[in-house]
Amino acid sequence: MIVRQAANVLELLEYFARRRRPATLSEIAQDLGWPRSSTFNLLGTLAEAGYLYEPRAREGHYPSPRLLSLARSIAEAEPLPEALTALLRELVDETGETAAIAAAAGTSAVFIEVCETQRPIRYFAQVGLRMPIHITSCGRAILAQYSAAERASVLRKVSFERFGPATLTSVAEVEAEIRRSMERGWFQNLAEFSQDLCGVSLPVPWGGRQLALVVAGPINRMQDRVPEVAARIRRGLERALPA
């Protein structure tokens, strides 16, 4: 279920992130397809709370530094260790593919840190990207850290939509794949969610948090290197997060 008012706030912030300059009420209403009255009310509410300001009179609104301050305070409360973010950069340099840290968000896995490769053909990802938790390598690496009861509670809520021939479509198939992955020593996704994408993941149980590190890229480049990439992730994690 989506709460429309909350979704509009997020859409407005993403709009400013793309636009990178102030916008008037008319511009926002037209660009986002919103009624002027509700746009006026939303802008007024955010301005009154100090999250929007007018850099120049009558030239439009723009997010204020209060938003950055709030985001910084939240991030500083539970930061990822520098060694882990440095490892993402190392993995990108060594594998030539995109690397990310994922966490759980209900029945989704969401990226909380991303380091993209600069290769022209690559896995495009960004912080906040959500994917089904049961058919992605990082999602299953997170689920593997749950108790059986916790995992069952999540999987009961999953919508088993088929995205391609390799997509897992039942709780039993997901559980079986998690067992195989734990025995093998890594989690993989070969075109289950995206037809041309391969992902390799390992769990990252850090500071009481259940995270996963994934390296992902085009399946034609990644498929034959899965064990090699998994071994590289494991060595990096052992160094970055010693027991």
Image (cartoon, rainbow, N blue to C red):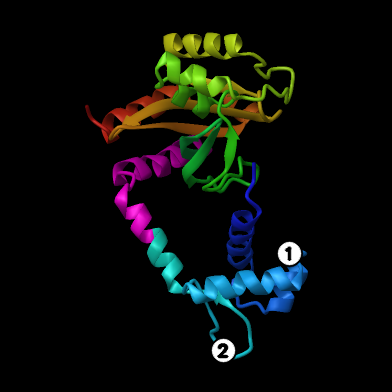
- Whether residues under marks 1 and 2 lie with C-beta atoms below 8 angstroms apart, the answer is no
Judge left or right: residue 34 versus residue 115: right
Q: Nearer the viewer, residue 29 or 122?
A: 29
- What is the magenta range? 72-98
Q: Residues within 10 Å of mark 1 (few under 14, many from 20)?
A: few
Please name the residue that numbered disc 1 is placed on: 32
In reply to whether residue 92 is colored magenta, the answer given is yes
Between the C-alphas of marks 1 and 2, the distance is: 22 Å
Q: Residues within 10 Å of mark 2 (few under 14, many from 20)?
A: few
Residue 139: x percent and y percent?
Answer: 51, 27
Name above or below for residue 229 compared with residue 33: above
Judge left or right: residue 201 versus residue 44: left
Q: Nearer the viewer, residue 107 or 133?
A: 107
Q: Which amino acid does the dot numbered 2 rest on?
A: Arg
Mostly what secondary structure, the magenta segment? helix
- Residue 34, located in which quarter of the rendered image? bottom right
Residue 72: x percent and y percent?
Answer: 37, 60
| Residue at the outermost bottom position | 57
Q: Which amino acid does the dot numbered 1 rest on?
A: Leu
Q: Nearer the viewer, residue 52 or 75?
A: 52
Name above or below for residue 158 compared with residue 115: above
